[in-house]
Amino acid sequence: MKKQTSVIAGFLLVLVIVVFAVLNNQNVPVRFGFASFQAPLILVIIGSALIGALIVFLTASATLWQQKKQLKQLNKELSESQTDLQKKIDAVTEAQQREFRNERAELEAAYQAELQAKNEQIKQLTEPKETSVHKPKQSVNYFD
């Protein structure tokens, strides 16, 4: 919609310049400081408008070219930054996973050692004690 408005506004400006130039078709002197000549006013107006349009076009295209160059550079920097950030994230993630695996292995080893100790305690408690020697009971006679 914005482009359509710009095209319509440009067309209207060109139409106004053409109408203005057609209404002013007398010969006029044109001086450039070191040279002068006679030309119809219509050619002077249209020539001035074309030179002005050319200057605006060159200025705008130079600015647009600089902006495109800057945009390209910024996109390159953004891409490099994203790549570096992803590498850092991957490195930190790998270090965190490695630390987690080490901590888990330590906990599993401690758990296995604790389980082994408990199994040994259970085994000692469930085995019959062989330290007591069975002697035949002597009968005690209290009436002798």
Image (cartoon, rainbow, N blue to C red):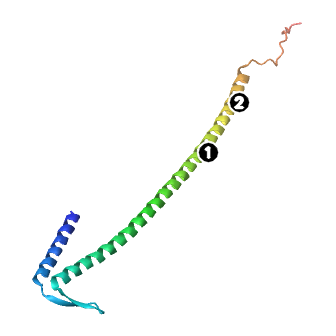
Is label 2 in a helix, a strand or a loop?
A: helix
In this view, 89 is above or below 66 = above
Of all residues shown, which one is farthest toward the right?
A: 144
Task: Mark 1 or mark 2: name the one nearer the start of the chain.
Answer: 1
Residue 24 pos. (x, y %): 12, 85
Residue 46, given in percent of the width and then of the height, sits at 19, 79
The crowd level at tag 1 (other Cα within 10 Å; few <14, some 14-19, many 20+) is few
* Residue 84 placement, left or right of 3: right
Amino acid found under the numbered disc labelled 1: Glu
- What quarter of the picture does the N terminus occupy? bottom left
Q: Nearer the viewer, residue 117 or 53?
A: 53
Find residue 53 and report its horizontal and vertical position in percent.
Answer: 26, 76
Distance from Cα at disc 1 to Cα at disc 2? 27 Å
Task: Farthest residue to the bottom: give it.
Answer: 33
Does dot 1 land on a helix, a strand or a loop? helix
Residue 84 vs 27, above or below: the answer is above
Residue at the extreme left of the image, as rendered: 23
Which sits in the foreground, 119 or 6?
6
Residue in view at x 17 percent, y 90 percent:
28
- Tell me the quadrant of the picture where the C terminus can be found: top right
Q: Report the side of 129 relative to 22 (left or right).
A: right
Q: Nearer the viewer, residue 135 or 138?
A: 135
Residue, disc 2: 117
For the point 42% across and 66% down, the residue is 69
Q: Which residue is mark 1?
A: 99
Pinpoint residue 95: horizontal percent, then vertical percent: 60, 47
